[in-house]
Amino acid sequence: RVLVLKLLSILYWTLFSPAMCLLIYLYSPVRWYFIITMVLFVLLERLFGGLEMVELACYRFFHKQPHLNVKKQ
């Protein structure tokens, strides 16, 4: 079963990578999506330290935990 998954993975990535390059080359909307996505990732890296830092900040904002060092009464 593992061998089959490995072979399917190799087949998938062998076909997927050239197909995406071809789509970027041939279709303007795909090209613009790719360019905008890359610009956003670079900006997130420069401004906030990466997408993972933005995700962590969002998680902390939406899942506020009480401080552990606050004494219980």
Image (tube, grey):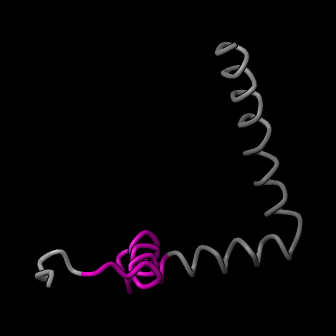
Can residue 67 be found in the magenta stretch? no
In the image, taking residue 60 as reference, residue 24 lies left or right, namely right
Q: Place residue 4 in its image quadrant.
A: top right
In the image, taking residue 41 as reference, residue 57 lies left or right, namely left
Q: Place residue 15 in its image quadrant.
A: top right
Whether residue 65 is situated above or below residue 6 in the rendered picture: below
Query: What percent of the width, then of the height, locates residue 30?
Result: 81, 70
Give the magenta-colored segment's residue range.
Answer: 42-66
If the image is split into quadrants, where does the C terminus sit?
A: bottom left
Please report the residue visible at 77 percent of the width from the left and 43 percent of the height from the top: 16
Please report the residue visible at 77 percent of the width from the left and 72 percent of the height from the top: 31
User: Camera-side residue: 71 or 24?
Assistant: 71
User: Camera-side residue: 67 or 60?
Assistant: 67
Q: Place residue 37 in its image quadrant.
A: bottom right
User: Camera-side residue: 72 or 42?
Assistant: 72
Dominant SS of magenta comes to helix
If the image is split into quadrants, where does the N terminus sit?
A: top right
Please report the residue visible at 10 percent of the width from the left and 82 percent of the height from the top: 71
User: Camera-side residue: 61 or 20?
Assistant: 61
Please report the residue visible at 70 percent of the width from the left and 29 percent of the height from the top: 9
Query: What percent of the width, then of the height, locates residue 57?
Result: 39, 80
Whether residue 12 is situated above or below residue 52 in the rendered picture: above
Whether residue 6 is situated above or below residue 39 in the rendered picture: above
Can residue 56 be found in the magenta stretch? yes
Query: What percent of the width, then of the height, locates residue 3?
Result: 67, 13
In the image, taking residue 30 as reference, residue 53 lies left or right, namely left
Query: What percent of the width, then of the height, locates residue 55?
Result: 46, 74
